[in-house]
Structures are given as C-alpha cells and as structure tokens.
Amino acid sequence: MSVANLSYDESRERYELDLRMYIDDFMVVSGILEHESQYKPSLTSVPSKSMVAAYVEENFKISINNQELDLEVHRIKFEELTIYVTFKIKEIVEPGHIESIEVKDSIFVDRFVNQRNIIHVEIPGLKRRSLLFNKYQQEGVLDFD
C-alpha cells in the first residue's frame, strides 16, 4: 500500500503533499530485488533518490480544476521500511476556487495485483475526502462543486 496526503497549510498559504510507500516493494518494481521477502532493512541497501523521484513523477499525478500540477520532488527520506517523499507544488489555486481534484496513481499496481494506494485530501472549506486506487482503478476524481 502507498498513502498520500494533500493538504493546505493556511498559516503558510501553501499546499503540502507527501507520499509514503514500502521500500521493499519499490526495490522489486525497480528490479533491485526479485521478491520483497529478500529485503533486509539497512540504510546501505536503499535505491537511489533519483530512481525514486523518476518513478514517482511517472506514476503519481494530480490535477486541480483539470490543470495538472507541476509536482517537484522536494525531499526523499528512507526510513526502515518506507520511503517518504515530499513535493513542492508550484501552482497555487486558492482553496476556495477548487472545483475538482483528479489523481492518477499507478504506484506498484503493474507488479502487485493486490496493491492498494490511497490519497487523503484535506483542504480548508472542503469536506475531507479520500480516493482508493488499485490495478483496475488507477484514476479518480473528487468533485467539490
């Protein structure tokens, strides 16, 4: 499973987006390991940050009001079992002007038939909502109008 969170920090007047995914699954998908059971937690056996950034940029996209956001990977942190990715969001759409959020999330779904991905959206003035993705459902839309 991967979990993403999209929120808006009112005090900083900016969107925040982060994503967590299991490191062993990433290593299988990227070809470093043949099977996730081969992974032994160690900071010396982590994939390169550029590999992670390229994979996430290809398999995780968000649009607000039908305009794809230019997501830039800001930080990648390897924890014992997970990869934690934070993004910079260049476009600024005022929270009160959001009519829809579309997400495309194909992280790991081509390799793991039981893969589940979720994104939680929590923006002031909008009802907190979530989308669930899997091999058969890789796109979803939240309408707020």
Image (cartoon, helix red, strand yellow):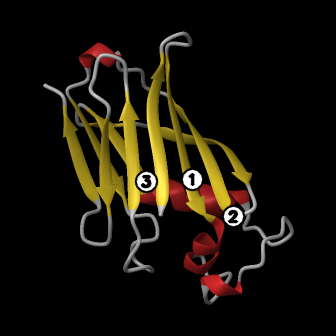
Question: Residue 81 — which label?
Answer: 2
Residue 87: give x, y in percent of width and height. 56, 39
Three-letter residue code for mark 3: Phe
**Vertical comparison of 19 with 48: above or below:** above
Give the number of the mark in front: 3 or 2.
Answer: 2
Question: Real-space Cα distance between discs 3 and 2?
Answer: 20 Å
- Residue drawn at x 45%, y 23% is 8
Task: Name the residue located 49 percent from the left edge and 40 percent from the top edge.
Answer: 71
> Where residue 60 is drawn, which disc sits there?
3
Crowding at mark 2 (Cα within 10 Å: few <14, some 14-19, many 20+): some
Q: Which residue is mark 1?
A: 20
- Classify 10 Å Cα crowding around label 1: few (below 14), some (14-19), many (20 and above): many
Q: Is residue 13 left or right of residue 82?
A: left
70 or 52, nearer to the observer: 52
Q: Amino acid at mark 2?
A: Leu
Query: How far across and down, in percent of the image, does residue 121 sit?
Result: 37, 35
Q: Secondary structure at mark 2?
A: loop
